[in-house]
Amino acid sequence: MTTRRTFLQVSSAAVGSLWSRALLASSDPGDAVLCQKLASDPLRPQYHLLPSHNWMNDPNGPIYFSGRYHMFHQYNPRGATWGNMHWGHATSPDMFHWQNEAIAIAPTPGGPDSDGVFSGSAVLDHGKPTVIYTAVAPPSSTGDATLRDGVHTWRETQCLAVAQDNALRIWKKLSEPVIATPPAGLEVTGFRDPALWREGDNWMLILGSGVRGKGGMILLYTSRDLRRWTYLHPLIEGSPSQGTSVNPVDAGEMWECPDFFPLANKHVLLISTMGKVRWKVGTYAHQRFTPEKEGVVDWGSYYAAKTMLDAGGRRILWGWIPEARPDADLIAAGWAGTMSLPRVLSLSSQNELQTEVAPDVAKLRADQSGNIDAVRIKDIAAEIDVHLHPKADEFKLRLYSEAGDFVTISYSRQSGGRELRVNTSAAPLPVAPGSPFRLHMFLDGSVLEVFANETVALTARVYKIPSGPLRLKFDGDVKISSLHTWQMKPISKDRLTGPLCS
């Protein structure tokens, strides 16, 4: 899997503290060949948010403001592999119909973010959209470096920018970091990805971090004005990891992309580490978090999750769906990375995290079929909702065309218990034989988001092009209570290639 940091090519574009236009440096907007390739690529999703071209990763600072949803994200304007991190920007009236906007925030040559504008969060401060993000630059000395992953050596600081217009297209940065160094005495494995919330008259901020040999850690800060921050203590500390990777994220000794929020009568912490987004549900008291339950948000291609409150007050989860093909394929395709569909979070009666795609997805539905023999999925774009009762320990749901199987979703008993598997990715899913079982799936080009009983999510990448419409078939002893499939409508006529091709 291509990670957040495969390589870096530092951009030296001359930009100041204000941006109001896109920096589409990698391709001529008049390149009709590239535009046609992107708009007609069957592996490019049609109803997920994705970049017009080039590389996308983490969702950053999703916010509802002035009647529109804004999604910022990590974006490389110079190529389809990781590097040159800017904040890309997309807007939507409903979290489903998106349009790509100009780049929002770019590195400032010679500034604290000269080597990249990394992940962060957006809040409203006295009604003004304000972001705090991690900035990276070369360290003044080896001892100043906070990011050492075996490839890069950087100094991470936290910087602030304020929107100058209601469309959130123009931002003004503070010239100096608002948090310049890690807490004294800590030899951190990382120092990034701020998340914020309001607590009384104070702002609270957490940062992903860790200590080599001691495990991951979430650092807690407080401020009255977002500009002067005081370190308090760790919100939570992990345990020593058994991982041996030089990269502390892969070893489990760096918790990145933290998010922290109340849900029902509990608090939820999200962290990304060791290739997965992990949730912890527990109690927040005296500015410390005590987890009581934990699990994995999504067992497949899903990372760097970030939440927001929508216009109706629901807690919405977003995640980056990374690619699972070589960099050479990404460069040839001209794009990489997709955002997940918005997922509504809730807690089960056992205080376990539950996810489902926001029901508003129904507005994308077109032709419907309730008969398995009549299903014909065109253009690799569909929603499939199946309620069934497995009568045995295993079954398979196959999507296939005349060329053979396109993707197989299987349920079986393994040595470690029952599991759900999509191609090569697997998730534990204990379901007693004969018990109700729901599979809810969203297929879109090379992306397949699968949800089972609202408790398990597994996102897969499928790099196949079927020969004609896809059909459905079950192998195994199952009773189907209901089956609904919908052809899904595209959210743009050109697979979101604007503004590149507009």
Image: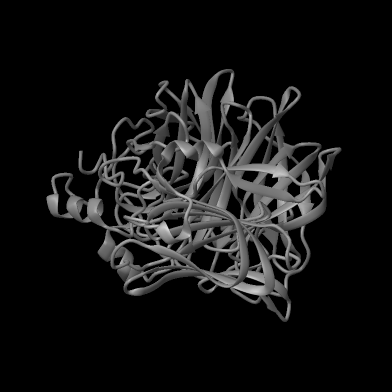
Number of numbered callouts drawn = 0
Residue 306, x across and y down, in percent: 58, 45
Residue 433, x across and y down, in percent: 74, 68
Q: Is residue 17 visible?
A: yes
Q: Residue placed farthest to the top in the image?
A: 126
Residue 265, x across and y down, in percent: 81, 37
Q: Is residue 193 above or below residue 463?
A: above
At x 39% / y 24%, what residue is drawn?
Answer: 167
Camera-nearest residue between 58 and 223: 58
Q: Residue placed farthest to the bottom in the image?
A: 415
Camera-nearest residue between 181 and 307: 307
Instruction: Give the colouring mode of the picture.
Output: one colour
Q: Is residue 380 above or below residue 348?
A: below
At x 31% / y 70%, what residue is drawn?
Answer: 328
At x 72% / y 81%, what residue is drawn?
Answer: 415
Left or right: where 404 falls relative to 409: left
Left or right: where 425 falls relative to 466: right
Q: Is residue 187 visible?
A: no
Residue 347, x across and y down, in percent: 74, 44
- The quarter of the image holding the C terminus is top left
Q: Residue placed farthest to the right in the image?
A: 286
Camera-nearest residue between 418 and 132: 418
